[in-house]
Amino acid sequence: MMTFEANIPNREECQTCALTFAYKEINLLYEIAVILTSTVDINDSIEKSMRKLKQNGYLERCAIFKKKEDIDELELVNSIDLEPYQKKNATYRFGEGATGLAAKSREPIVIENIHNNINYLNKMGNISTQMVSYVAVPLLQDEEIIAVISANIGKNSPLNFDEIVRMLTIVGTLFIGSMKVQQTIVKEKESLSDLKTYYKEESQKEYKFENIVGKSTKMQHVFNLINTVAPSDATILIRGETGTGKELIATAVHNLSRRQNGPFIKLNCAAISETLLESELFGHEKGAFTDAREMRKGRFELADGGTLFLDEIGDITPSLQVKLLRILQEQEFERVGGSKTIKTNVRLVAATNRNLEEMVRKGEFREDLFYRLNVIPINLPPLRERYEDVKLLTEHYLHRFMKEHRKNMHISKPAMELLLDYPWPGNIRELQNTMERIVLICPDGEILPEMLSHVLPFNYQRLYMQPEVATPPPPTYVSTPAPLPPQESGAPMTKKNLLELEKESIIQALIDSHGIQSKAARLLGMTARQIGYKIKQYGIEF
Ligand SMILES: Nc1ncnc2c1ncn2[C@@H]1O[C@H](COP(=O)(O)OP(=O)(O)OP(=O)(O)O)[C@@H](O)[C@H]1O
Ligand SMILES: [Mg+2]
């Protein structure tokens, strides 16, 4: 400790005084620790603690200065008894005045009489004659100066300088510890908030139009339709085979609507039992059924002010169809086991890959509900009907998965042709999965057609990827290949041979029309119903 003109009284001279002081000191430190740990506003708790020190008559004008990040300079971070204009002047280079000297020398500085010592710069001015001494204590962490805590001491302070230095060292260390914790919390909060923004943007990106790949005329029609109808509150029914992007389009509708800042709630109606589905849709009151221990809001309530996406709507039971109809007509419902009518303001988007018209004809789906849902129908074409999009999607997913798996590859022309020829019965989901498999399995560099043998379905490989032979075997575009029996020329055609021939023709037509049943039917001069029946009869899978 560097002392200027100090005359430190020796407390050990009186044992009772020492004990009383130690007790008071511990008490005060306890109170400060409580203040520092009981509030989240660290500046407030530091200032309260400084006031506590003042109240006990120990110190005045207590201040804590932190070292700036890249330079040897101290700046004021917390203080009491200072006016804003005084705070402005409170910076010290290392070595400047008593405060700067404490940082530079790494030792406590004690100035017994500030009124006649050049080391006391009085930069902040306005010092009262009551304050006679000044103490500045450096605070170190891992051998580095991180701050200086200082205080003025009045004529009647009950403490000697040793005690003041000790008190400031302990309290200053507590302050710095709390500041560090606070800093960590602020940093974590910032990074969480950054992450939240990032994920929000990412999830929206996924569903904004630019992430829905498609240049084909059919998809352009879909985009135009969505642009037109999304802003309204009209109910939308999205139709399409599995994997054609129904959920993607439903989310785009929500994000392009006026409800985009409201909730977007989804429910797959096929995945759960009728009882559970009812409670998922409308919620339940406490005690409504054995497991209903608490009241739970349903999806219609959760989606209030936003959009509710009901996937696989064709799978709901007749009794739920009635309830759904009521909510669509009146926008109100009751929770399961409850009698209170709840109003809701929900825009409904439904989706199905089932033939609802057929179901209506068969009496499996209510006609009135069908018309309520089918206000704006959006039909998503299967991928095999938009070949121009296959290349785009292939490239899109290739780049996405290359980035994800840190690989670098490109598709050779023959391999791309193979992918373009494949009928993609699982549509875009299948293409997406296939591309991920390709990226994972194939080595960096050029992707060759033979490398695709591990990623395309077995039947397709047998058909397209066999090495050429003099007499190619019959197509095996089926799960259980049924080779034709050798046909002696002139031998009589048995019924069995005829059936085999018919089956083979259907398979060939399906191959030629890339799996489009209606096209294959036209090639064979059949109706779509007839070919459908035959495909079932022969167990042809494609
Ligand atoms: N046009 C598109 N561009 C890019 N990715 C797409 C496109 N359409 C669909 N996808 C992707 O394909 C996958 C399947 O899409 P989605 O789940 O929306 O299909 P779906 O019609 O709801 O299928 P299912 O009937 O099986 O539920 C998703 O990963 C989705 O991101
Ligand atoms: Mg879906």
Image (cartoon, rainbow, N blue to C red):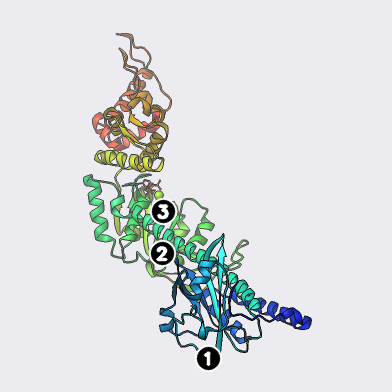
Residue sitting at x 53%, y 69%: 179
Alpha carbons under labels 1 and 2: distance apart: 65 Å
Q: Amino acid at mark 3?
A: Asp
Question: Residue reaching furthest bottom?
Answer: 129
Discs 3/1, front: 1
Alpha carbons under labels 3 and 2: distance apart: 16 Å
Q: Which residue in the structure is indicated by mark 3? A: 311
* Image location (x, y in percent) of residue 291: 61, 61
**Is the C-beta of the residue carrying label 3 under 8 Å from the nearest atom of ligand 2?**
yes
Q: Residues within 10 Å of mark 3 (few under 14, many from 20)?
A: many
In this rendering, would 24 be left or right of 49? right
Q: Secondary structure at mark 2?
A: loop
* Image location (x, y in percent) of residue 65: 49, 73
| Viewer-closest of 245 and 335 | 245
Question: Residue reaching furthest right?
Answer: 15
Q: Which residue in the structure is indicated by mark 2? A: 263
* Image location (x, y in percent) of residue 7: 64, 81
Q: Amino acid at mark 1?
A: Thr
Upstream in sequence: badge 1 or badge 2? 1
